[in-house]
Amino acid sequence: MQAAMYLLSLAVLCWKLQQVYSVQLRDHGYEDVIIAVHPQVPENPQIITAIKDMVSEASFYLFNSTKRRFFYREVKILVPNTWQSLNFQRPRYEAHQKASVMISNPNFSYGNDPYTLHYKGCGNKGKYIHFTPDFLMDDNLLPVYGPRGKVFLHEWAHFQWGVFDEYNYEKPFFLSVDNEIKATRCSSEMVGMYVCKKRSCSDGECIIDPLTGNLEEGCMFLANSNQKGKSSIMYMQSLSSIVEFCTEQDHDKEAPNMQNKICSYRSSWDVIKSSADFKSTKPILGTGPPPPPSFLLLRSRARVICLVLDISDNMAKGQQFHRLRQASAIFLQQLVEPGSYVGIVTFNETAEVKSTLRHIVSEDVRWNLTSCLPDTVRGGMSVCEGISAGLQVNKGLDGIIEGSEIILAVSGRDTSLPTCLTNVLGSGSVIHTIAVGHDADPELESLTESTGGKMFFTSNNKDSDNLIGAFTEIFPVNKDPPDLLTKITSVQRLIEVEGHFSGLVIMDKTVGNDTVFTITWEAGDPPYVIIRDPSGFNYTNENFDHNLLCQVSYLKIPGMSQAGFWTYIITNTLKKSQVVGILVTSRPSSSTIPPITISGEWTDEGITPEQPMTVFAEFKQGHIAVQGANVTAVIESESGDPIIVTLKDNGAGADTLRNDGIYSGYIFLFPKNGRYALKILAKSTNTTSLVPALNNAAMYVPGYIENGTINMNPPKPIVTSFEQRSIEPFSRIHFLGSFKVSYVLENMENKDIFPPCRIVDLEARLQNDYAILTWTAPGDNYDQGSASSYDIRMSNSPSELQQHFPMAVVVNTSSVHPKPAGSRETFSFKLHNGTGDRGIILYIAIRATDKAAQQSPVSNVVHVTRHVLQLKDLNFAISSAVPRFNTTVIVISLSVLSLCLLLGGGLYCWRKQASFQLLSDAHSIELQEFYTGTPKQEALCKDQELPMHVTSTDDISEETVIILEERTDF
């Protein structure tokens, strides 16, 4: 019977695990879509109505655009606890930080533009979608963005399926392989008109730049309001006829947009079809519409928390019990927010309620709760007894357990733990777990995973700060800015008798309110502490509040603490060595200027040799990205030995985009199986600066062409004039949580099982007929060490490189010796056109090989384009270059002498015969290059700025349209 109950519990757990972390797809319908309204948004019932209307409309567009596959079944709207006018239910695990959609005020970068925070690359899910109240309720924005439901679908495709935008504000036009000026768009068949939007255009008409062959700045493309085509939602969802995603048939692979760059020229529909959602779902038969979505209104309430603490004999090992009591005291006295309700339960074989729920309304309540903390350990252990008592304590407030929290700290093992899973799942309570030491129950995390809590681990090392750090992270992240807790520094250090340690604390101007210096020690009287502020004033022990039972002292800086460099010196007054620690926390200095914050996450798909752990740290001030910081991941193992990895924002390796404020890195060299704790340290550098974030935003449509008439929308409002600027010094620390590793084998450190990481930042350009490639070097093991060789291939089909890389044409790279990981690589080869009057578009990809012959995944795909050379191009006529658009015609005449000067040098330096047709309406001219020339002419070729690494391939099929030529004169 017990075994059956155990299996039932595991079955329920497996189902529940899929429920609490993210959006779920069940029987064609998306459920658990959480839309959270930020506490700063004033109460307005119309926002709720607008959300319902938007999602209902979006469900219809979603259903039809995915060929009757998906719709929205269940949406939960979470509002602040200050909203009172409507009938709300109490949330369970739903929280602001788990929301798929955020409703909050405009940010510096986007104003009212809807956008999606998405930094995990093509085909991977985003973090959240962002809308503003104005976007939801201001109908004047409808002509700009289009129907709100279709905008929601645009952002949903970013968030759920990992596709990217098909427009490009910075490169709105490009010159195609056929020498046609095209708008950066999808589908390639969308029609419209080029118009001038700036006075730089001559007489208000668009001009082609004779140097680039592209339109000069000031021109824009306006689409016809009525289109024959139906795509694409990722380009211009505002048009009524646009109801589908771009497919392989109409996707423009040449367009310089993010979809092509990040997804290697795959269409958005192709990426969607590759998703797990699509593969697990077939179209719904019939012709009827999808069922309407249901909405659940939730309102956050005051927190109800019970500390459930292990006091069994397991806690007697080392300093575990002492450290747990210290961390609990700091949580009660400094961290838990005012207005919360907190209780305390201890357990060994049985459970004891040390304190029923107390309302945190004063310092006296905090100190009284701290006095209830346990002071001894004894006996065996029953985790289920402790959990059951904790749930009953939480029920004592109003008879409801749902939405309450338990902080469960456990050191030993309990074989009966699975038997209480059913009760835990049915309670609706969230359980945060802290595994104290390497003997903590291996099934402990199942409680967290099944209830949507957080999980932490601390080793037995006396100088580990991860136990205190765990308590600093168990607090809501959706607080008003003045209530946000910022952790500036945390250090634990072993000090010898009469020894001391000192350090620097950087207090930046975005924080300084409610600043607290917390000092911890092991035994006896407090150590002697001197803290000096930037003006030179010293705070000493007399200025601290001391908790001698828990060995914790607090210095609360009155008023607003000074910005600048603070110093501390802590001297050990005990007659033996002891571990002393310092934790510095503060809150924002302003209710209107956001503080500098750091948050993070890691990939949780399973850590294996083929799938390393990827850590992401988002560094920002409000919605503005912080670039150029020094960001480090510190991983603590069960033995206590740290693994230190630098996270980078360089657009290479694990990082998707350069300088977007998202710092990323691979972690894979784990010494043994078991639990690991992860924290992030961040400091400013001399190059740290603030830059507008670059996320996936819905297009602000400037206007339309209706029946040949130009109808312009109002210019896009400038929220603030923001340019990149330097930032004053700061430091931050963030404790992310814990994870498990189970793939490490014996003697694994002596085996090369890790391949080079995928190259994600390959770039290509054409210069003097040379394809010049640049990328960031991977390592022998992911992004560490040096690879052994590179394999570069090319094709006239990007899909061949993605799906059949070994079948593509090889480029000789024998002259290239890979540099150390993180270095910039450059390689080039010469293109030779043997196709007459046809242009060239060549797709290129690369992969690296290590010394064990392991290969990295194929890189992102890039392309270079050589345009067809035609006499009509010398007139730079838009009417002939873009025949399918209504355009303004500007003709610029060039002399025959200019033509000769333009073509002569480049044609001469080629070595093999090629013909180009220069066409006009009445005649053609054939130019043929020469094999040799005078010494003076040869020297002229050498003086041109041609790359040094030149390779050749002579056995290329005629279909590739490319001939590579070896240069020997460098």
Image (cartoon, rainbow, N blue to C red):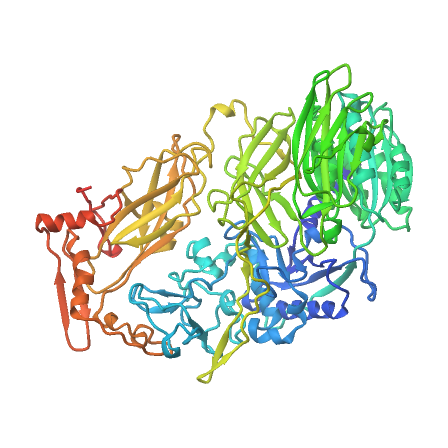
Q: How many marks?
A: 0
Q: Quadrant of residue 857?
A: top left
Q: Quadrant of the C terminus?
A: top left
Q: Position of residue 214 (x, y in %)?
A: 34, 66
Residue 243 location in percent, x, y?
A: 53, 71
Residue 697 at x, y percent in the picture: 55, 62
Q: Quadrant of residue 629?
A: top right
The N terminus: image quadrant: top right
- Whether residue 869 is situated above or below residue 555 in the rendered picture: below
- Judge whether residue 228 can be spotted in this image: yes
**Which residue is located at x 14 percent, y 69 percent?**
925
Image-based side of 29 in relation to 393, left or right = left
Q: Nearer the viewer, residue 687 or 102?
A: 687
Camera sees residue 446: no
Residue 514 x %, y %: 77, 44
Left or right of residue 538: residue 676: left
Single out the residue that lies furthest toward the left: 934
Q: Is residue 69 left or right of residue 295?
A: left
The residue depicted at 73 percent of the width and 67 percent of the height is 48
Relative vertical location of residue 31 with respect to residue 554 in this rendering, above or below: below
In this view, the residue in front, 469 or 666, is 469
Identity of the residue drawn at 72% across and 25% down? 570
Placement of 278 over or under 242, stated as above or below: above
